[in-house]
Amino acid sequence: MNDPLAPAPNARPQARPRQGLARWRVLWRRWWRQRMGLQDPSRSRAPAWVPIRGLRPRHRPRILAHLLALDAQDRYLRFGYPATDEQIGRYVAELHFERDELFGIFNRRLQLVAMAHLAYAVEPDLSTCAEFGVSVSAHQRGRGLGARLFDHAVVHARNNGVRQLFIHALSENAPMLRIARKAGATVQREGGESEAWLRLPEATLDSQLSGLLQDQAAELDYRLKQQAQGFLRVLAALQEIRQGVREAKRTT
Ligand SMILES: CC(C)(COP(=O)(O)OP(=O)(O)OC[C@H]1O[C@@H](n2cnc3c(N)ncnc32)[C@H](O)[C@@H]1OP(=O)(O)O)[C@@H](O)C(=O)NCCC(=O)NCCS
């Protein structure tokens, strides 16, 4: 069988084959890049399916890290004001996972690279309304992740009886308003701020099934990434032990 990591016949003679952990890291990275459609630099958009996972209270540290990494301008666009670290900390601490829905996209290192907050209205007369908020890490923008999170939130909102989805965005926020308009939202601009309302159709068996399947597949994807991370950690530990034994032999 061909070794995918074997040096090519025309490889430079000084290129040494990778071993142990480094070899597994390369294989894992290669598999991930193929899966994410990144092998060909001309294909910069995200692949047809992106695993979007429901976030839980245990993900708070990852949510915090993702939001704290946003620069001042992005925080302004996301929250409508230049949120400080303390304000972001409070927002994360007060997230209501039982009432609202939070969705995330993780990279292979299980870092949260994009997240969305679907906040269900608490007022009884607005019980069929929800608000959508989203952020994508700067280095992952323009690949369709924001739009995917929006589509995902729409399916969940529909399935939970929401008929009107609200998006508050600054008028300068071209990508967010583009996502909303493309989905068919009515956008009302009031000076520097814009409000977008999207009317949602009632849930169908199809939307219920599609939501369920997406969630199951994303859960499986997350578990595979967790296992891969665990595997790499074990390999790293083994390599350290081997190195220790080798050094001990050398000194005796
Ligand atoms: C808004 C945001 C989530 C968009 O995420 P993204 O993953 O980059 O968005 P997408 O790649 O899905 O692009 C969405 C659309 O906007 C378009 N777009 C992207 N950047 C654009 C720009 N600067 N000007 C105009 N359109 C733009 C894309 O082409 C795409 O349209 P298309 O599907 O017709 O090609 C991201 O910019 C972000 O996190 N900003 C900071 C936080 C924020 O503004 N949140 C929204 C308020 S709640």
Image (cartoon, grey):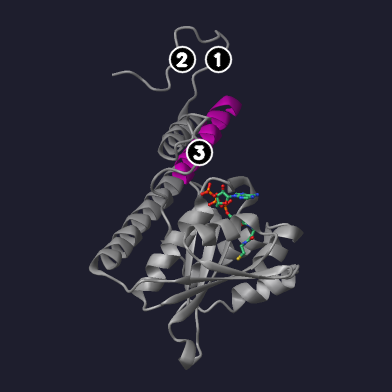
Amino acid under disc 2:
Pro
Horizontal and vertical percent position of residue 96: 52, 79
Residue placed furthest toward the bottom: 124
Horizontal and vertical percent position of residue 51: 41, 53
Q: CA distance from mark 1 to mark 2?
A: 8 Å
Judged by depth in the image, the label closer to the viewer, 3 or 1, is: 1
Q: Earlier in the sequence, mark 3 or mark 1?
A: 1
**Camera sees residue 69:** yes
Image side of residue 129 versus residue 205, left or right: right
Q: Are marks 2 and 3 in contact (CB under 8 Å)?
A: no
Does the magenta run of residues contain 15? no
Q: CA distance from mark 2 to mark 3?
A: 28 Å
Q: Is mark 1 within 8 Å of ligand 1?
A: no
Q: Earlier in the sequence, mark 2 or mark 3?
A: 2
- Which residue is disc 3 drawn over? 241
SS category of the residue bearing label 1: loop
Amino acid under disc 3:
Ile
Question: Could you tell me which residue is drawn at 56 percent across and 32 percent down?
Answer: 248
Q: Is mark 2 within 8 Å of ligand 1?
A: no
SS category of the residue bearing label 3: helix
The magenta span reads: 232-252
- Which residue is disc 2 drawn over? 7
The circle drawn on residue 153 is none
State whether the magenta stretch is mostly helix, strand or loop: helix
- Which residue is disc 1 drawn over? 15
Specify few, some or many for label 1: CA neighbours under 10 Å numbering under 14, 14-19, or 20 or more: few
Q: Quadrant of the N terminus?
A: top left
Question: Could you tell me which residue is drawn at 47 percent across and 26 percent down?
Answer: 19
Q: Quadrant of residue 74?
A: bottom right
Judged by depth in the image, the label closer to the viewer, 2 or 3, is: 2
